[in-house]
Amino acid sequence: GLWSRAASLPVARGSHTAAVVDGKIYVVGGAIDDDEVGVVVTDRVDMYDPAADSWQQVAAMPTARVSHAAAIVDGKIYVSGGLAESGQYSDALEAYDPVADTWTTLASLSRAREHHASAVVNGKLYVFGGYSSSAGRMDLVEVYSPASNTWASAADLPLPIDESVAVAL
């Protein structure tokens, strides 16, 4: 029931995502404040090892972005959507393999979006809602199969949502 201080993240950021694989925390992408140029969208990924109380920078994402989602499938971090530095909404799906320290670009979402949620159920990645300037707030649900690298549609949400979180129970 107590909080304790741990090593600080090497580069402060917001609008990132985080995931845990094999007891290590991965902080992925986000926005970094730069005194000279302002806010910078980053592809940076940092891994925290609680046993060593230390951070290590690992392989960068292929797509720098903010306001994306992440979920774990079979020990890999699947990162979807977000907003790129150019201001374009992303439809990218990329998977990080912590063992190989490599990223793989996979089949794209049907619609680019940010501020969506993702969760894994029965080995499949579900992506819920989100936002884009062309579609607004979305009720769209998509399901990704890692085995076939394909997306399928699922029943829409009852209401459009964005800036949400999904958790599989």
Image (tube, grey):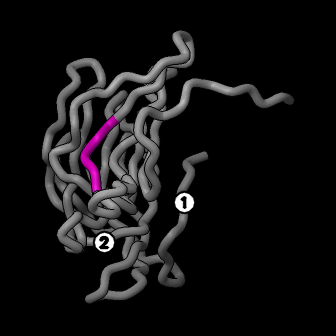
Residue 165's mark? Answer: 1
Residue 139's mark? Answer: none
**Residue 36 vertical position relative to residue 45 in the rendered view, above or below:** below
The disc labelled 1 sits on which kind of residue? Answer: Val
Circle 2 residue: 113
Q: Going from the N terminus, do you reach mark 2 or mark 1 first?
A: 2
Residue displayed at 31% across by 44% down? 78
Residue displayed at 28% across by 27% down? 58
Q: Quadrant of residue 75?
A: top left
Please provide the residue range marked out in magenta.
Answer: 41-45
Where in the figure is residue 33, as x and y percent of width and height? 39, 56
Residue displayed at 23% across by 53% down? 64
**Residue 128 vertical position relative to residue 43 in the rendered view, above or below:** below
Judged from the image, the secondary structure of the residue bearing numbered disc 2 is loop
The disc labelled 2 sits on which kind of residue? Answer: Arg
Q: Is residue 127 left or right of residue 111?
A: right
Quarter that holds the N terminus: top right
